[in-house]
Each structure stands twice: as C-alpha cells, then as structure tokens.
Image (cartoon, rainbow, N blue to C red):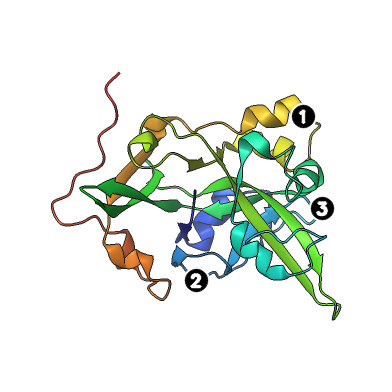
Amino acid sequence: MCGRFTLTADTKKLAEAFSGYEIPESLPPRYNIAPAQPVAVIANNGLHKLEFFQWGLIPGWAKDPAIGNRMINARAETLAEKPAFKHAYKRRRCLVLADGFYEWQKVNGGKTPMYIRLAGGEPFGLAGLWEAWHGPDESLVLSCTIITTSPNSLLANIHNRMPVILDRDAWSAWLGDEAATPEGLRALLRPYPDEALIAWPVAPRVGNVREDDPGLIERLTGAPDLPHPAR
C-alpha cells in the first residue's frame, strides 16, 4: 500500500513538471502527507488545474463518509470489479502530485521506514481516482484514492505493493484528454522501472502524523541507498 508521501517541490518546479496545468503561486512543502488530509490532484473535470481533495475515496453511494478511511489505495488488478472504484475508474480519474513516498520494510522482526523517489528528485504524478460525495446536509466532499500495483524488483525488497507512477506521456490518456480503450488504461497501471527510483532508510518518527519537516526524508546516518537488484 501507499500510506504516506511527500510533495516538497517549490511551485516553479511543479509548474515545469506539470506544464499545461494551472499551479498555485505558493504551496507549502509537505514531508508527511497522511490519509484523510488534503492532497494535491489534477482531476479529469475539465479544469486542468491543481486542486485539493481529501485522501480516502468516498463513493457517491456511501452513507457514512468514514468509509474513506479504508479507501486510501485501490488495487490496479481489481479496479473494474470493485463497487467502490469501478465507476470512478471509468469516469473520474486523476493525478495525485508527489515527489516521494514512504514504505515500511520488515527488518529483524521490526519495520524500518524507507523513502523512495525518482533518481533525479523531480515531482511526478501518481495514478488516482476521485469522487464527489454529497452529505445529507448538502455538503460536498471531493475525495481520491491512489492506485497501487505489484512492486518492481527494487521495491519488492521493501513491500509487496507500490503506487502507480505515470509517465508524462500517459497523462493525457489517463485524464481523458485523448481517447483510451479499457485495455490501454490497464496497460498504464504497471510497476515503474526500478532503475528510475532510489530508496533509503529514514527515521521512524515519520510514523507520527504530527511530524512534518525536512528531517523526515534525511537518510539515517551512515545508511546507503537500497541497492538495486543485480541484473
């Protein structure tokens, strides 16, 4: 699963990475984005701009919005079947903006948090789905989920799932700006190349949602990057 991630890039870098989409002039860096918090998304709603949706998808038919707490991730393999996701998969897809994410690696009976990002450090778009939920008091909640897939060979040493990172040339199809078949969409939901990612261990305090500072992504003293599997 993907349960924590970061978006620390300044707005200039975001505007360059997401050119063609409207990016705010200022955006505070986030080093520990957690479920139920607002996350930056670009949705296929015709606006072509960065918006903030609640992390944890609330299906339109849900009676209780608390169901979103269990819907922070959606498995790529079953999107077309699961009642909570199948309609959003057809009509309401989005990019979730990030520049890194955390996974916990089991080590000697415990767990060590690992920080994973692109080798170049640039921001990227995670494949997501979104929904609009209307409460009985006529309130509106826009929410989203992050799609996960099987891990690449690097991430397999850490966790049995990884979030789907979409290449720039996949965004138009994912967001519906160009025609895409069901088969074409499924083909986008694959593990990202392991050689394009790097990972290193970080301090366990990232597990505390109240912690949010640059020190969270600093590698543990003396710890090397996670080695890439031999080819």
Q: Secondary structure at mark 1?
A: helix
The residue mark sitting in front, 1 or 2, is 1
Instruction: Name the residue: 50% across, 55% down.
Output: 13
Q: Residue at x 29, y 53 (%)?
A: 111
Instruction: Give the left or right position of residue 175, taking residue 190 as reference.
Output: right
Q: Secondary structure at mark 3?
A: loop
Where residue 147 sits, quadrant-wise, is top right
Q: Residue at the spot x=32%, y=64% of the render?
A: 216
Residue highlighted by disc 1: 182
Please state which amino acid type lies under the numbered disc 1. Answer: Pro
Q: Amino acid at mark 3?
A: Gly
Mark 3 or mark 1: which is in front?
1
Give coordinates of residue 14: x percent, y percent.
Answer: 54, 55
Q: Quadrant of the C terminus?
A: top left
Of residues 71 and 46, the one drawn nearer to the viewer in this rendering: 71
**In the current view of this chain or complex, which residue is farthest to the left?**
222
**Picture coordinates of residue 195 (x, y %)?**
37, 30
Disc with the residue nearer the chain's start (3 vs 1): 3
Identity of the residue furthest to the bottom in this view: 137
Residue in view at x 64 percent, y 27 percent:
187
Residue 202 shown left or right of residue 121 in the figure: left
